[in-house]
Amino acid sequence: MKSGPASELDLRLMAAAIRLSRRNLGLTGTNPSVGTLIVRDGRIVGTGVTAIGGRPHAEPQALAEAGEAARGATAYVTLEPCAHHGRTPPCANALVSAGIVRVVGAASDPDPRVSGKGYAILREAGIEVVEGVLADQAADMLRGYLIRSLNKRPEVTLKLALSADGMIGRRGEGQVAITGPVSRRQVHMMRAESDAILVGIGTALADDPSLTCRLRGLEHRSPLRVVLDRGTKLPVQSVLAQTARDVPVLVTAAEDCQPERRNRLAEAGVDFLGVELHDGKIALPEFLEDLAARGILTLMVEGGAYTARMFLEEGLVDRLALFVGPSKIGPGGIAAPLDRDHIPEGFRLLREARFGDDVFLEYVKGD
Ligand code: AOF
Ligand code: ZN
């Protein structure tokens, strides 16, 4: 990856822009959450992050905050500034008109309306451009957007809570506490930063989960809740259906689903998404394409074992988030769909941390 003449200070400021971009993860619709800093004489004079809903983009907000101080300043952008006339004028042109003299960029934009053109507009205007600075870290934050551009499907994170003996629960017992409060808060933060969260109907029936983000102050960031259900089995009395008017619920519907049950769920506010069946199983690639078409960039799969296995077997998992608790479940346990000592091929360890008494392991696909 091209890194150019980036200084130590450039790296520090780009890292700050990337941290800033995290703020609106999961809130910007089909648009990526981008961070921008305007820096004049070593001082940050403007900051911007893509607005909730996706517009305005990050750059015009940072420029507005900087005002006249943008003249002669450097801009740090986590994604190549846009070059197209969309619902807002191109950010590359806005940087030029504001008198920016240097742009430090991280990731390139795969959008064909922008790709290469954003940086070209800047260079043609005589601006010094340094590309690819901390590109991998920026790409990690932009991953939903980048994977959707490449594969026409959302980025899929499989989250699993494992006991010390590799179980994810106990048969017939609904929700079992495997991990502690610190891990739980992390999971809720992951939910807040995701566009959608998914469980199979088995988990929806066994656990009756709410799947919302319950971090104080971030309740409004609960993602779309999706249930993979080919038989319209979600009960109208379930927590999911009963709260569908507050936080949207989307249930898959195969052609043979029961219209009466479907109508009752629809009355409760549940939305439906038609799916095809292949050999009696929901066709996941097509389903994911439809989710992406609905603007979902990141999907978190929370269970259960059967659903997790389907995603893994079809190679549709991009990221593994494993929370390993300290105690054993023993006999009657439900075996996890993977073994932490035998992570599927193609994944590499990105992060390892301790959350209270739990171990957190995060793996991503690719090198
Ligand atoms: C930027 N800064 O903060 C973001 C960008 O539908 P539109 O007109 O808003 O354009 C969406 C495209 O804009 C999107 O595909 C991506 O190329 C770019 N996103 N660009 O300069 C930003 N979020
Ligand atoms: Zn833009």
Image: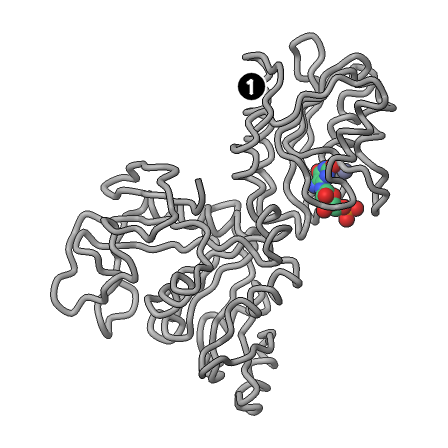
Q: How many marks?
A: 1
The residue at 60%/74% (across/down) is: 273
The residue at 21%/56% (across/down) is: 166
Residue 80, horizontal then vertical, whole percent: 70, 33
In terms of image quadrants, where is residue 76? top right
Residue 294, horizontal then vertical, whole percent: 66, 63
Residue 67, horizontal then vertical, whole percent: 81, 20
Whether residue 144 sits left or right of residue 306 in the image: it is: right
The residue at 86%/39% (across/down) is: 89
Residue 330, horizontal then vertical, whole percent: 12, 62
265 up-or-down from 327: above or below: below
Give the position of the N terminus as an image quadrant: top right
Describe the colour scheme in one phrase. Answer: one colour
Query: On the image, numbered disc 1 is attached to which residue?
Result: 11
The residue at 60%/78% (across/down) is: 274
Whether residue 78 sits left or right of residue 344 in the image: it is: right
Whether residue 135 sits left or right of residue 312 in the image: it is: right
Q: Secondary structure at mark 1?
A: helix
282 up-or-down from 258: above or below: above
Q: Is mark 1 within 8 Å of ligand 1?
A: no
The residue nearer to you, when weighing 15 against 191, is: 15
**Quadrant of the image where one finds ligand 2:** top right
The residue nearer to you, when weighing 234 against 164, is: 164
Give the position of the C terminus as an image quadrant: top left
Q: Amino acid at mark 1?
A: Leu
213 up-or-down from 83: above or below: below
Query: Callout 1 environment at 10 Å: few (<14), some (14 to 19), or many (20+)?
Result: some
68 up-or-down from 290: above or below: above
Q: Residue furthest left?
A: 331
The residue nearer to you, when weighing 214 against 51, is: 51
